[in-house]
Amino acid sequence: MPNYKKYLVLIPGIILAFILYTLSQGINNIIGIELLGYEKSPISTAMIAILSGILFGNIFQIREIFLKGLDFTQKNILKLGIICLGIQLKPFEFLEFGKIAIPLIIICIVSVLFVIKLISKKIIIPKRMSYLISVGSTVCGTTAIMAMAPVINAKKNEVSYAIANITLFGILSMLIYPYFANFYFNGESLFIGLFLGTAIHETAQVAAAGLIYDQQFNSPETLNISTITKLIRNTFLIIMIPLFAYLYSRGQIKKRKYSILSIFPYFVLGFIAMIIFRNLGDYVFIDNQNETWSSIVENIKILSKIFLTMAMAAIGLSTNLREIKNMGYKPFLVGFVAMATVGFISIITIEIFINYII
């Protein structure tokens, strides 16, 4: 087979994933904007894509012609989406909240990882599943899960289960926490924003929670603080993926030759490069209000969402619900404990800051 033909076989699956992305975006706009009346839908298109993929993939038999392209989308287009995600991160904006947010995020991450490790030993769930739930709960939800999956060779059904887990508890947090935080923190936008940014899994869900709070309590400051806090939290993806790759693989050192270079996720370097690219571009062009640069940034952001959502659609289409059912309820229990832990630790840490630092 000529070299170009091995790429042609990928096209049907990639097109199918893109079609499902397009349908998911349309459904999201109808529900979030037309029916619920939001200016920007609080529902994650990625969530709709993976759920739609699971639905279609289990009702209809996916033909073999699509399988190679779907697999390529899950592994390679996913990585491209994560690289493009780096364009959203502007570390220079974080300085105002960094002194508070970074220690808070680190404490939450360490606490959740410790709790998940303990409970995973007690109720016994697969090692890969505990890693996926851990990184999804502590860093950036489904994006972190999908970034971690190829590094630890997670199975498709494990990825889908972990994403469903994180999505379910993230949505619950998104709907409940804005009202709870307003009551608990007595309307203080700084503390509410920090809480929403650290206690909710998904970037889209954090933005939605901040938007809900803003619309209910007229506080755009909370929306900004929660979003910036979440973006700071997202940067920990750079650390967590190589760390988890090492922790997962170290037990296999005796079985085979081991090198950190063999497990290092090199697409993370692209992610870092994109962050640098964004900040250098801002430094050069932003003062001049360069419309071309702003357009480039926005287009890369759009591409990131498209690529990541296509990957989620591909995972959904490849998911077998019967196999997920066989995994049982235990991973969901771990996910619930993770959600409760990150929320509780966030509150305690903010309370310490209020009472002893300010």
Image: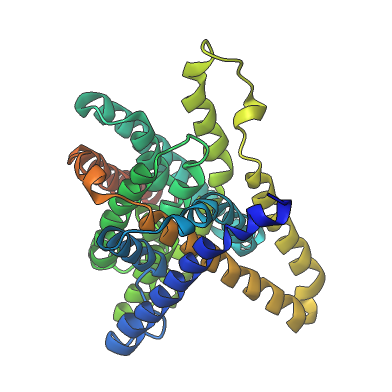
Question: Residue 130, can we see it?
Answer: yes
Q: x and y percent of residue 3 in the render?
A: 72, 51
Tally of numbered tags: 0
Residue at 20% across, 44% down: 325
Residue at 33% across, 81% down: 32
259 left or right of 213 in image: right
Q: Nearer the viewer, residue 108 or 74?
A: 74
Question: Residue 351, can we see it?
Answer: no
Work out whether 144 lies above or below 289: above
227 left or right of 133 in image: right
Residue lying at the far top of the rendered structure: 254
Q: Quadrant of residue 284?
A: bottom right
Residue lying at the far left of the rendered structure: 329
Residue at 66% across, 56% down: 5
Q: Quadrant of residue 34?
A: bottom left
Residue lying at the far front of the rendered structure: 1
- Color theme of the render: rainbow
Q: x and y percent of residue 108 in the render?
A: 39, 42
Residue at 38% across, 33% down: 128
265 left or right of 358 in image: right
Q: x and y percent of residue 140 in the render?
A: 45, 52
Q: x and y percent of residue 195 in the render?
A: 36, 56
217 left or right of 122 in image: right
